[in-house]
Image: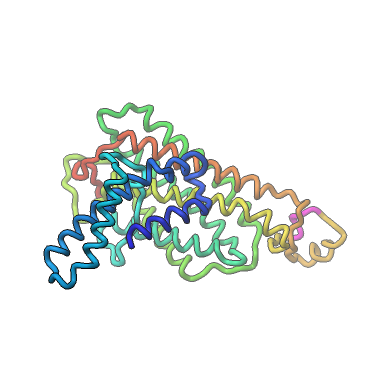
Amino acid sequence: MTLGVLADLLSGARRQDLVTWTGSELDRMLDDAQTAPVIAYLMAITTIAGRHAMACLPLEHVERPMGVTGYAEHALDALAIPDRDSMLFRLPSFAPPSTPDTANERLESGLRNWAQAARSELARTIPSTEVLRNITNQAVHVYAATDHLLDITPPSEAAAADEVAPARASLRAAAVAMQRAEPLWAGVTTATRPSHEYVTTATTLYEILNEILAVPSMQHDRRPTSAGLDVQQALTDLSYIQSDLADLLHAIAELPDVLIRSQLLYAPARVLPCHVERLRARQLGQWVALLASDDIHLGREALAGAHAATTAHRVLGRSLAQGAYPSDHTSSELELA
């Protein structure tokens, strides 16, 4: 069953447009050289589990485990895979705690719940521009929190300063791009209200990120308390959410054109080019549907923000992968203010 689930995931990944795994990256991850070690690993587990079952079960019940174990051993021999690494082994899997207690658990839970709620909002027939604006604004908050942790945490001795500088520069560039797009979303509407679930998760995440921004610089002479933040884990979680942000922002970048062509995006008539059809609406202070000829720069700025988000995600991931920050959790814990 596990092997079947793996096949379904790989097949689905080939059909899904994953912005952060596009082109050659996705091809490399799903080719035989990457999937074979994972399949061999699953077959080895199946063989061990099957042998254990045959050793413990009564003889009349071993027929099924014997057949499965024989298949797994045959597949393992046919694969003839040595001890080889695979990018698939490094894919993240999220299971945030339902009742988070520590600072890191609250951060992970807040990030994952918000990302899931944001994806649900974007899947609505007519998404709320309040949500689109908030996602853009939340991205700025995530970038600020990440940059703050990079700033206050001393890099490892082996890491040169130039390994961290590009990550911080890309985070700031992405934040600036979001700040250009966010006010443009504030000036339009689809007349759709955000769901209560999204508002709740967005508010919770905002408060959690504010706590991180209030974290003081590392003090090695103070022992971590129960409220301590594991900075290495926090940076990892913030790096993962930036993959979600890149996907969300690329999806958002496609919406202005779609909504305008569907006449579902509205703006105050007084701020739009004056047409005969809009004269009465301007006098009455009404909102009117945007036209393709109305150049409000929203699509362009949203697309620029999406590209900046993708760049920030890749540069930060490269910096963390190079071990720019210590992996010793004890020495990298900070106390939340």
The image quarter in which residue 218 lies:
top left
Q: Is residue 261 magenta?
A: no
Q: Which residues are magenta?
A: 269-273
Relative vertical location of residue 260 with respect to residue 173 in this rendering, above or below: below
Between 162 and 211, which is closer to the camera in this rendering? Answer: 162
Q: Is residue 270 magenta?
A: yes
Which corner quadrant holds the N terminus?
Answer: bottom left
Residue at the (55%, 61%) spot, across then down: 122
Residue at the (39%, 46%) spot, across then down: 239
Asked if residue 218 lies left or right of residue 174, the reply is left
Residue at the (54%, 67%) spot, across then down: 194
In the image, residue 193 lies at what x, y percent? Answer: 57, 69
Q: Furthest residue to the right?
A: 276
Q: Please, what is the dominant secondary structure of the magenta stretch?
A: helix
In the image, residue 240 lies at what x, y percent? Answer: 39, 49
Relative vertical location of residue 86 with respect to residue 92 in this rendering, above or below: above
Between 107 and 48, which is closer to the camera in this rendering? Answer: 48
Residue at the (70%, 62%) spot, across then down: 266
**Residue 336 appearing in the image:** no
